[in-house]
Image (cartoon, coloured by chain):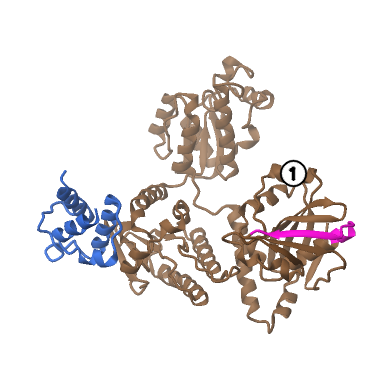
């Protein structure tokens, strides 16, 4: 296979020379048509001027579109996602480059959904295995325009080869399942509803895992059907009465439970579901049934079925990787995509306003201050684990630990933020530990960086301080614990009007505040306390 | 394998060629271009666990210079 690679850096050691032709650096003037496939594999350049760099990254979108429109639509076009290998941020709230990178990736993902020949490869799947100092080798970069460390070339080739093979396999839509000794152990007609092996100890346990995994597959869009030699009434009864049954009638899109030959049944299933025989995978423990289907319907994929129940889970993994792994974005990614899109709109909006104030007014920001409860507890714990930049103390808590502190009488609030461009969800939290009747200590205060830059942090803390005052507290203590990443919060409490009473050798700052007045909060923010 | 043979084998692999001899140089080996030169430097660093400076990498223009450079490092 001949492949043409669009690139802006040296990447030959990674993709290799076998069958590969490379464009000039960032040269899109030539889109050859005597090749079988195209690859787009750009790197984020190095430039300390983030505005310039974000513009350059944004230009990759247009370049990609130009190239894609000139390439033959019938030929595979693989787009590697952009990863900023050397993020250089002079200020903590600098997101222009990250936004541009995200916008490119969103665009590429969208192309892969719209165009069947476009495949999107998540390059971060590879880069996330390494720390930043391993990924970039400056010596080689400056000598050869190759930012990615050449010592990772072997690892990369292994990763890419595997992915490349997976992409070449066609995706299947439908799994056709036998029942006896396939979805459960034993024969229903002989062993009876409670005699079949399902649930409990081995081997029943193996079939439980297997059924549960198949159920997840169906929730991800794979069609499950049954093709079994059985009495349908017996099967329906087993689905209803066996307490260990996970996959039941409602999980199957179509059934062929009868005594006819399986090839005829499969043909009918394909007609009923309006899918091609070539998008079906047939699973049956009986080699003669498999052979019949292979002979009669060569379009149907018929993998060997494992002999032992304990081989079912590795078999499932293989099924997913070979036939059902879906090269599409998840719903969560979609939600993220939405948020990124909203961020981009906010940026564009900013350019149109004469000053910051009218911009903030126009956003129509809604802040909800919510006491911690069982619904938001997992998210609160997750934020303490993941937030690094706007995090005053960087204390990491598990869900159980947060719960424990609630039971110990701590006041824990979280904040949900939305504006007219979209809902950011729960993006901030504060943990308050009562010290005595009138004193409370701020143990944790953090906000997700995607909502920063709008003064929301101050509005959040002021609202909470007003609440505390209503609760009878008159005195607040707090601390800033420096880390490599939270420098932007070093003077946050100073800005909030707190008194710094001590600065320790490691940079820790301790604060005191008398709660002697109500804090005024600007009316850009519509605040609701739940 | 002797030290020289090891180096020669690393060079052969880095240049993606089947045959190589001790008189190989940038002048007489067409595969020894700038890209393969860097692959060679990277492989040598990896194999002998050394760091080569860009100036040193530039000086390694034939087999005997590669060997001499490595010996000064090891």
| Count of residue discs | 1
**Quarter of the rendering occupied by the N terminus of chain A:** bottom left
**Secondary structure type for disc 1:** helix
Q: Colour of chain B?
A: blue
Is residue A122 visible from the viewing direction of this image?
A: no
* Magenta residue check for A329: no
Residue B49 image offset from top left, x and y in percent? 30, 51
Q: In this orientation, which residue lies closer to the viewer: A440 or A396?
A: A440
Above or below, comparing residue A497 to residue B10 in the picture: below
Q: Chain of mark 1?
A: A
Above or below, comparing residue A209 to residue A155 in the picture: above
Q: Residue furthest bottom?
A: A354
Q: Residues within 10 Å of mark 1 (few under 14, many from 20)?
A: some
Residue at the spot 19% in from the left edge and 48% down from the top edge: B6
Which quadrant would residue A226 be assigned to in this image?
top right
Question: Is A212 situated left or right of A85 in this image?
Answer: right
Residue at the spot 30% in from the left edge and 62% down from the top edge: A35
Residue at the spot 68% in from the left edge and 68% down from the top edge: A491
Above or below, comparing residue A423 to residue A431 in the picture: below
Q: Which residue is mark 1?
A: A403
Which quadrant would residue A478 be assigned to in this image?
bottom right
Residue A96 image offset from top left, x and y in percent? 55, 71
* Magenta residue check for A468: yes
Residue A50 image offset from top left, x and y in percent? 51, 74
**Quarter of the rendering occupied by the C terminus of chain A:** bottom right
Q: In this orientation, which residue lies closer to the viewer: A193 or A411?
A: A411
Q: In this orientation, which residue lies closer to the viewer: A227 or A97?
A: A97
Question: Is A167 situated left or right of A369 in this image?
Answer: left
Q: Colour of chain A?
A: brown
Which quadrant would residue A253 be assigned to in this image?
top right
The segment highlighted magenta reads: A467-481
């Amino acid at each position: 296979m001949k492949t043409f690679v669009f690139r802006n850096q040296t990447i030959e050691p990674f993709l290799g020379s076998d069958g590969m032709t490379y464009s000039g650096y960032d040269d899109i003037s030539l889109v050859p048509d005597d090749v079988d496939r195209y690859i787009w594999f750009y790197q984020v350049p190095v430039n300390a001027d983030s505005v310039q760099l974000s513009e350059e990254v944004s230009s990759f979108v247009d370049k990609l579109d130009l190239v894609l429109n000139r390439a033959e639509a019938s030929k595979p076009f693989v787009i590697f996602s952009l990863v900023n290998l050397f993020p250089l941020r002079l200020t903590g709230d600098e997101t222009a480059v990250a936004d541009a990178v995200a916008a490119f990736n969103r665009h590429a993902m969208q192309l892969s959904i719209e165009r069947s020949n476009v495949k999107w490869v998540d390059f971060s799947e590879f880069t996330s295995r390494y720390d930043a100092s391993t990924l970039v080798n400056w010596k080689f970069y400056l000598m050869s325009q190759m930012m990615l460390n050449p010592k990772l070339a072997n690892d990369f080739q292994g990763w890419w080869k595997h992915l490349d093979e997976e992409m070449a396999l066609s995706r299947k839509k439908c799994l056709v399942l036998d029942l006896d000794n396939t979805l459960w152990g034993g024969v229903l007609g002989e062993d009876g509803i409670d005699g079949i092996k399902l649930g409990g100890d081995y081997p029943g346990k193996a079939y439980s895992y297997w059924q549960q995994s198949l159920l997840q597959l169906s929730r991800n869009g794979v069609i499950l059907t049954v093709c079994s030699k059985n009495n349908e009434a017996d099967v329906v009864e087993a689905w209803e009465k066996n307490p260990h049954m996970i996959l039941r009638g409602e999980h199957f899109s179509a059934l062929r439970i009868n005594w006819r030959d399986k090839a005829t049944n499969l043909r009918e299933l394909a007609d009923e579901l309006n899918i091609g025989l070539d998008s079906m995978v047939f699973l049956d423990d009986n080699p003669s049934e498999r052979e019949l289907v292979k002979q009669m319907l060569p379009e149907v994929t018929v993998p060997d079925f494992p002999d032992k129940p304990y081989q079912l889970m590795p078999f499932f993994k293989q099924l997913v990787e070979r036939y059902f792994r879906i090269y599409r974005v998840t719903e969560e990614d979609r939600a993220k995509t939405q948020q990124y899109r909203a961020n981009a709109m906010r940026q564009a909006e900013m350019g149109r306003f004469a000053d910051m104030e009218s911009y903030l007014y126009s956003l129509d920001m809604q802040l909800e201050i919510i006491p911690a409860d069982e619904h938001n507890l997992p998210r609160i714990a997750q934020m303490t684990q993941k937030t690094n930049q706007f995090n005053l103390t960087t204390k990491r808590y598990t869900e159980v630990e947060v719960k424990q502190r609630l039971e110990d009488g701590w006041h824990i609030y979280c904040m949900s933020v939305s504006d007219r461009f979209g809902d950011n969800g729960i993006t901030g939290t504060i943990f308050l530990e009562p010290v005595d009747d009138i004193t409370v200590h701020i143990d944790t205060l953090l906000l997700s960086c995607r909502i920063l830059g709008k003064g929301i942090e101050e509005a959040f803390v002021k609202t909470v301080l007003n609440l505390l005052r209503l609760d009878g507290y008159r005195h607040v203590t707090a601390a800033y614990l420096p880390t490599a990443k939270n420098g932007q919060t070093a003077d946050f409490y100073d800005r909030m009007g707190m008194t710094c009473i001590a600065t320790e050798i490691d940079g820790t700052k301790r604060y005191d505040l008398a709660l002697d007045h109500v804090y005024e909060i600007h009316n850009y923010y519509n605040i609701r306390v739940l | 394998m002797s030290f020289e043979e090891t180096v020669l084998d690393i060079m052969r692999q880095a240049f993606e060629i089947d045959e190589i001899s001790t008189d190989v140089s940038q002048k007489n080996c067409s595969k020894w271009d700038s890209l393969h030169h860097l692959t060679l430097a990277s492989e040598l660093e990896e194999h002998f666990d050394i760091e080569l400076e860009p100036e040193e990498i530039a000086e390694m223009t034939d087999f005997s210079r590669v060997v001499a450079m490595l010996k000064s490092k090891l």
